[in-house]
Image: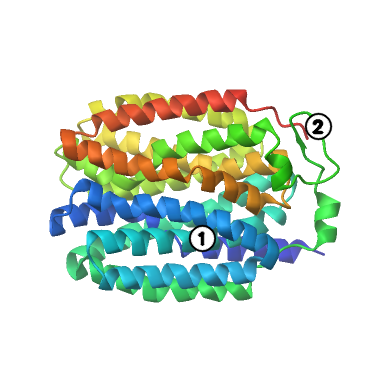
Amino acid sequence: MYRKKQINALIFGTLTMLLIGVNPTWSVFSNALVTQYGWTYSQATLPYTISGFGYSAGVFLFGIYYHKRGPKKTVLIGGLMTGASLVLSSYFFSPIPVAFLYGVLYGMGVGAAYTAAITPMLKWTPGKKRSMASAFATIGFGLSSVFLSILFSKMIPVLMVPATLRIAGFVLGPLVMVMTFFVKDPPEEFLLANEPAPEADGETRAGDISLKGALRTKTFYLLFLLFVFATAATSVILSSVSNIVAMQSDVPDPFVFASLATIGNLAGRLIAGYLGTKFDGRKILAILFALLSAIMFTFCLYRHFFPLAAGTVLLAAGFGAEMTLFPILITDNFGVTWYSEIYGTIVGLGSIYTLAGPTLAGKIADLTGSYTPALLMCGGYLAVAVIMMLLLPKKKH
């Protein structure tokens, strides 16, 4: 009865994700801003950093809006904001206007569209298969980053940055708005028939746990700390990998590392989605963050293409796995009814750390001429994420 609607939710949610993946390609833009326009490293990474805050504010505000108004209006607003931000940034092209027009407006638009795409996908896919639904959603986002990073790296040398932003805005924004005709939540009877009652902190609940109920559990705060430390570390690589490689090696084309990062990110999402159907997501992420911490601590020692490429792919894959499995940690403990509000609140509260990570790394590079201190700092963040995973209560349903 519901099979076709489940498939539609996966298809159109994934298509929405395919259209909002500009932000993970920002290292392509930041490298061009430094080399072609004379921006400092911190100026070049500031739009990406602020967009992290904008995204966090977007998923928080539109998570609440989604719960009241549904996915159609939420994705429409997301398309309007993402398209407008890119076009306006192309006309007001200097460090401060771009930082706020792109950072705030695009970030919030992605938060709205992301929420409107992934929430129906999770709701329509119950049980163990939910990790694959999350993987499809985040893979769409990753695939977008792959083809857009390649496309932008070809467009920027020919058209320059402003024209590239303008074309992206006029094409991608309207296409996101088209998705408003296709996304929808499942009916209540579907959820009642397919959703087990979640448990948190040892207390069985009669139904899904609201945001207010989640705030009374230690699980919520452990998930918050996990998000803060893991995202603060991995966002540095996604925003600055081209600059890091250019600074510490003689690799002739650092642009290629942005593509490698997005490919690794995509692979991590797919692999994590599959493993999530077989194993406990907590154990997967604990092992993964321990490995990533070791890579981050040693990344500053890499000088040649293959070690740099391998490190970049693995770090990006780790971020992709986190993006796939983090929503499952929330639904495992709190259910799907208030997912958009709980996820948005965690991300919103952690936004100050997401904001600080890449900007602090860029400022350190400006002052010291090296990303080594920032990479060591990020290794420490990932070590803390391992501790949070080990403290997280076991899934109980």
Residue 255 point in image, percent of width and height: 24, 50
Residue 214 point in image, percent of width and height: 70, 40
What kind of element bears circle 2?
A: strand
Whether residue 360 is situated above or below residue 101 in the rendered picture: above
Residue 300 point in image, percent of width and height: 25, 29
Mark whose residue sits in front, 1 or 2: 2
Crowding around mark 2 (Cα neighbors within 10 Å: few <14, some 14 to 19, many 20+) is few
Q: CA distance from mark 1 to mark 2?
A: 35 Å
Query: What residue would you read off at disc 1?
Result: 17
Name the side, left or right, on which 168 lies relative to 390.
left
Query: What residue would you read off at disc 2?
Result: 203
Residue 102 point in image, percent of width and height: 35, 62
The quarter in which the N terminus is drawn is bottom right
Foreground: 224 or 275?
224
Crowding around mark 1 (Cα neighbors within 10 Å: few <14, some 14 to 19, many 20+) is many
The kind of residue tagged 2 is Glu
Specify whether residue 335 is in view: yes
Specify whether residue 279 is in view: no
What kind of element bears circle 1?
A: helix
Q: Residue at x 33, y 57 (%)?
A: 149
Q: Residue at x 51, y 40 (%)?
A: 321
Whether residue 143 is situated above or below residue 15 in the rendered picture: above
- Residue 167's quadrant in the figure? bottom left
- Residue 97's quadrant in the figure? bottom left
Whether residue 287 is situated above or below residue 333 in the rendered picture: above
Foreground: 358 or 246?
358
Q: Residue at x 21, y 38 (%)?
A: 365
Dot placed on the residue nearer the N-terminal end, 1 or 2: 1
Q: Residue at x 56, y 68 (%)?
A: 75
The kind of residue tagged 1 is Met
The quarter in which the C terminus is drawn is top right
